[in-house]
Amino acid sequence: MKNIAILGLGVVGRGTADLLEANKALIAERVGEPVNIKYILDLRDFPGTPYEKKVVHDFSVIENDPEVELVAETMGGSHPAYDYSLAALKAGKCVVTSNKEVVANFGEELLAAAKENGVSYAFEASVGGGIPIVRPLVTDFIANKIVEISGILNGTTNYILTEMKTKGKSYADALKEAQAKGYAEKDPTADVEGIDTCRKICILTALATGILPEAAKVRTIGISKIDGADVKLLEKKKYAVKLLGRMKMQDGKPCPIVAPFVCGADSPLSHVDDVFNGITVCGNTLGQTMFYGRGAGADPTASAVANDILSILKDGKTSFAPTFNKAADGDVIASENFVCRRYVRTNMAMSEVEKVLGKVVDLGGAYITEKAFAEGEFDALAGMFDSALRVL
Ligand code: HSE
């Protein structure tokens, strides 16, 4: 019997516990022995549930029990999630997590602690909900240099944008629904202002390059200021506005950014709707490949957590071991240098617009540039237009 503990019985923790129970027989067969949830750490007691007898309120019970081989951290937030994870690794227990905040902030320390103690720190559920993206980036691109990653990485904002576009719902109503469905963070500011997407693109950048950008330094623009007039105008021309986390290799170094991007119908990301996430990864020999699936919610995220649990129990304590190095000065190209084409909405005549932006494509009241502008260069021009967006 393999004994594990779950830290936090919220949406993801509960989903994981339910999945391990529902697929018990199959899991025992695949791991080679039954997987038992010995403890659940939570502040609450859950009376009348199957988990009542497993609840503990003191982490040291788990830390000091040699029978617990693995800890699933599904608490969210930096502390005490980071502290418990580190303590568990130091106690020789593998840790798996859905906590992107901890991975983005402390991935370097926790992966190093895992290595020092002969265990794994795994975080498939931290990016893309149920989509397998973390392990594939570690194992399946080793013959390629990854040159670009672009992703719809936040289910809540994609759900909101889709409901607004297809059903004409208000931003506030769509957000409430996303919260009710268990997609949103406790404080949905992290979703709508792009902070969650930023953490995820930092993690993907680290998986692709080994360098973990500092999230606070990545230019991060959310969806709260998107103008409905742009969404409507663009929809008529078959474009979609999507909140993207992007990382492009520029001058051999990663350049990350988070912002709403205009995506043309020829981009697979423009067709990723609802709570789904979509991530394109471009390898220098492979070209573009795409990962797609449910990006948030109890069941998909629990699936990723459980996959990590099973992989480690089956393949061994040290089976997942990437290395993250926090970006030092000069390791990352600042977002201000991120280069992309632009969309502008304006009453100016096309000839006037072209004097400023060079050749443009006319969308009727709005234009898309042929030239790609760096953030720093376009910042000085943006104020001339009624609105401006980046183009994928
Ligand atoms: N709040 C996150 C989202 C949860 O909406 O994508 C999954 O990380």
Image (cartoon, grey):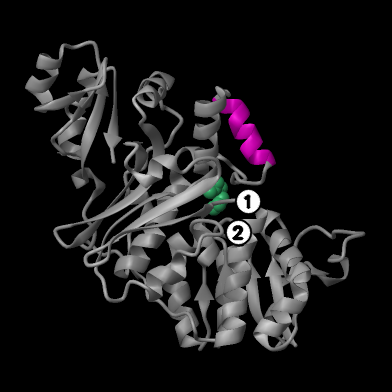
Q: Position of residue 145 (x, y in %)?
A: 24, 68
Q: What residue sits 10% from the left and 15% below the top?
A: 351
- Residue 332 image offset from top left, x and y in percent: 24, 58
Q: Residue 297 shows which numbered tag?
A: 1
Q: Please rate how many residues cluster around mark 1, counting C-alpha atoms within 10 Å: few if below 14, some from 14 to 19, many from 20.
A: many
Residue tagged 2: 301
SS class, disc 2: helix
- Density class for disc 2 (Cα within 10 Å; few <14, some 14-19, many ≥20) is many
Residue 8 seen by the camera: no
**Is 174 placed above or below 3 here?**
above
> Disc 2 marks which amino acid?
Thr
Q: Is residue 195 magenta?
A: no
Q: How many numbered marks does the figure carry?
A: 2
Query: Disc 1 and disc 2: Cα gap in Å?
Result: 6 Å
Residue 179 among those drawn in magenta: yes
User: Which residues fall within the magenta stretch?
Assistant: 171-180
Query: Is the CB–ligand 1 distance for label 1 below 8 Å?
Result: yes
Estimate the x, y position of residue 186 in percent, counting from the top left: 62, 45
Instruction: Assign the N terminus to one quadrant of the image.
Output: bottom right
